[in-house]
Image (cartoon, rainbow, N blue to C red):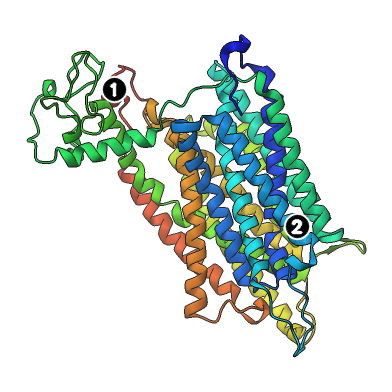
Amino acid sequence: MEAPSEAHGKLGGWITFPFIIATSVGLTLTFAGWQSNLIVYLIKEFEVESIDAAQISNLVNGAGSLIPVLAAIIADSFLGCFSTIWISSIISLLGTIFLALTATLDSLRPKPCEVDSTSCSPKPRVQYVVLYAAIILATLGSGGTRSTLSTMGADQLDKPKDQGIFFNWFFFFWYAASVVASTAIVYVEDNVSWKVGFFICVATNVLALVIFLMGSRFYSNSKPGGSPFTSLARVVVASIRKRKVPLPSTGEYFYHGWESHSVAPSKNCRFLNHAAIESEGDIKPDGSTAKSWSLCSVQEVEDFKSLIRILPLWSSSFFLGTSIGVQASLSVLQALAMDRHIGPHFQIPAGSILVFVLISTAIFLALLDKFLFPAWKKLTGKSLTPLQRIGIGHVLNALGMGVSALVESKRLKVAKSNNVDQGSNIVPMSVLWLVPQLAIVGIAEAFHYPGQVALYYQEFPTTLKNMATAMISVLVGIAFYLATALIDVVRKTTTWLPGNINKGRLDNVYWVLVVGGVLNFGYYVTCAWFYKYQDLKEVDHSGSPSDE
């Protein structure tokens, strides 16, 4: 399949907007439609232990955040966005079809085993092979489209203002589709059948792929121009190769690319300066580099240093994301063990409980931009800095974990007083008790997530601006894997997380997250205190001063 070419005349523009947005909505409905209810599906249909199901969900969420970064590198370096998107959409479709088949064919899922029965038939391994292959393919495909779709959509527009408008609407529709998937599709899976719910996901995937390809004659397709990660890797390799070359004291012995001035690189992280030292045979007669992995420009070295400077602040958000990942997976298990009825006829699907995080984030983002931030500026005369926004997010997130611990402590007391373990595992306590803790975490996300993106965009040089979202994706992906590791450690060293959470101490897990959150906030404050905003004059040589 060929990417669109310039042969069609003027390409790009707002005419591509409905195709990109419809594709994003369809693929988001597909992924969120099965992923939101994955824990419940594994427990009820494949008899996976509850904590193991939560761990699998964390792994899927982690991969769903890391794969977009890999897809962006592939798109930038080799395939381009258009090819990456349609190939990933097909991979997603294959995985979703396999997942739907596990809900359709009796031979692809275990036969239910009666309680206290001694004649349970062994579970064929092929059933789990098909299940996990389906999950892997669907996750790979979805991850391959997440960042490339937004990038391709923005590339269709020339003006930064138009690109900003596009991103606002892109993420609005992404949130809206996530909410619909986490409620409507999950409701169908719980109350109609898993087969119908999963085939709805198949249909939305097919529709998204068809709509995306229908718009191919309108797209402006940028050729792969290389990934910024390649440039960063070159700095490391060139520094190692020239580590024994003495550092010059003046700027004229360093390579500056096509820039006319000869400024020496900054003195911090001096080892990296070796990458910009000019040696015999490094430069072609036309001024370009003869060996790109042996010589980098001063600007490329300074770009790499700007990334190193922000790494401590970036790393302080690992535990922030870890606590969110642990709460997300365990909240579904709590919901399964609580009264989910609202009225006599309606029951909230356990997989839909996390929609309250999305709703509170969306509402508070609007309130922050329209009311709270302007009020703060009017009172103090200053705008909230990105570092302050992130700090507030840290505090609110720790508060959310504290509320989670208190609510779980109450749930366990209700379970004990009603002798829940003697009969049903459902505690006579409304699932709506989980809403405050999820809402607080959602409000925290409204502070720290945009704050981090703003910080990276503000502090990174022009050549690395596109890495801002990638930094967040890597952060979230690693955090979900750390959440998986943390739960494993707790299971192996304590009795807090048994198969039946009514017999465990989930509240203690949340208190560990509170303590960790407080300590991590101290680390963040220390990093923020010593952090100095980037001097744009020094790095960009543009002559324009920093805002800070």
Question: Left or right: 271 with respect to 157?
Answer: left
Question: Is 374 rendered above or below residue 120?
Answer: above
- For the C terminus, give its image quadrant: top left
Mark 2, secondary structure of its residue: helix
Crowding at mark 1 (Cα within 10 Å: few <14, some 14-19, many 20+): few
Please state the horizontal and vertical placement of residue 217, each as a whole percent of the image: 66, 19
Which numbered disc covers residue 41? none
Q: Nearer the viewer, mark 1 or mark 2?
A: 2
Q: Which amino acid is tagged 1? A: Lys
Residue at point 52%, 64% (across, down):
484
Question: Is 270 rendered above or below residue 522?
Answer: above
Which numbered disc covers residue 101? 2
Residue 477, can we see it?
yes
Question: Is 242 rendered above or below residue 165?
Answer: below
User: Residue 118's quadrant in the figure?
Assistant: bottom right
Mark 1, secondary structure of its residue: helix
Q: Which amino acid is tagged 2? A: Leu
Residue 373, can we see it?
no
Residue at point 74%, 47% (across, down):
181
Please state the horizontal and vertical placement of residue 197, each as a whole percent of the image: 80, 53
Crowding at mark 2 (Cα within 10 Å: few <14, some 14-19, many 20+): many
Residue at point 76%, 41% (across, down):
204
- For the N terminus, give its image quadrant: top right
User: Which residue is tagged 1?
Assistant: 537
User: Residue 195's quadrant in the figure?
Assistant: bottom right
